[in-house]
């Protein structure tokens, strides 16, 4: 019986230690990213979207590093969302969290990926939007609820950033 109690105590201590280290890591990441500006607010008068798709806002990471989650301003929080493409930009309307709006002039690319921090799916399962803010580059992942929405969303974003066909002429990275 004493061995079982010791094993449980050691296991609990290890779990508490790991949770504490994760909390310290998250806090340190927030400190490193505190200088990042908050994304711009969406315009009051948005107009009608060119295209909208339901799905999941996966995460925003630093550009080119799909594991470096951006925690500042809630950009690293996963949520059910609607991705709406407007003539002036792209809006991720996240359920239970703040909206993420990317103005048209800040969009730099769109592509399909297999995964990002916290979400890995089938080949080309995520729509990944590349964008800039101040002197930083970011990648934001979105998974459409319905597979039929993915090519339409990709085309609408691509058209917004003046690319003709993202499947044959990707804006920032070759689609595999």
Image (cartoon, rainbow, N blue to C red):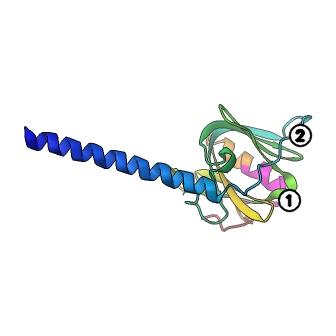
Q: Which of disc 2 and disc 1 is earlier in sequence?
A: 2
What segment is highlighted magenta in the picture? 154-166
Image coordinates for residue 25, horizontal then vertical, percent: 50, 55
76 above or below 161? above
Q: Is residue 22 magenta?
A: no
Q: Nearer the viewer, residue 30 or 105?
A: 30
Q: Nearer the viewer, residue 151 or 74?
A: 74
Image coordinates for residue 36, horizontal then vertical, percent: 73, 56
**Could you say which disc has been placed on residue 76 in the image?**
none
* Residue at the spot 15% in from the left edge and 39% down from the top edge: 5
Q: Is residue 65 visible?
A: yes
Examine the image and state in which quarter residue 149 appears: top right
Compared across the picture, whether 132 is left or right of 16 comes to right
Q: Which secondary structure lies at badge 2? A: loop
Image coordinates for residue 94, horizontal then vertical, percent: 68, 36
* Residue at the spot 20% in from the left edge and 41% down from the top edge: 8
Compared across the picture, whether 135 is left or right of 120 comes to right
Q: Which residue has dot 1 on it? A: 162
Q: Which residue has dot 2 on it? A: 43
Image coordinates for residue 61, horizontal then vertical, percent: 63, 57
Q: Quadrant of the N terminus?
A: top left
Label 2 crowd (10 A; few <14 / some 14-19 / many >=20): few
């Amino acid at each position: 019986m004493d061995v079982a109690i010791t094993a449980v105590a050691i296991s609990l201590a290890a779990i508490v230690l790991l949770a504490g280290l994760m909390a310290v890591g998250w806090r340190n990441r927030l400190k490193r990213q505190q200088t990042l500006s908050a994304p711009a607010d969406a315009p009051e008068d948005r107009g009608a979207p060119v295209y909208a798709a339901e799905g999941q806002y996966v995460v925003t990471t630093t550009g080119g590093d799909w594991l470096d989650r951006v925690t500042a301003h809630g950009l690293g929080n996963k949520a059910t969302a609607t991705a709406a493409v407007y003539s002036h930009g792209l809006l991720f309307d996240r359920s239970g969290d703040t909206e993420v709006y990317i103005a048209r002039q800040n969009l730099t690319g769109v592509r399909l990926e297999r995964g990002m921090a916290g979400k890995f799916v089938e080949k080309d399962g995520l729509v990944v939007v590349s964008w800039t803010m101040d002197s930083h580059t970011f990648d934001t992942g979105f998974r459409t609820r319905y597979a039929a929405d993915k090519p339409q969303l990709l085309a609408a974003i691509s058209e917004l950033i003046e690319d003709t066909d993202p499947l044959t002429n990707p804006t920032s990275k070759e689609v595999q």
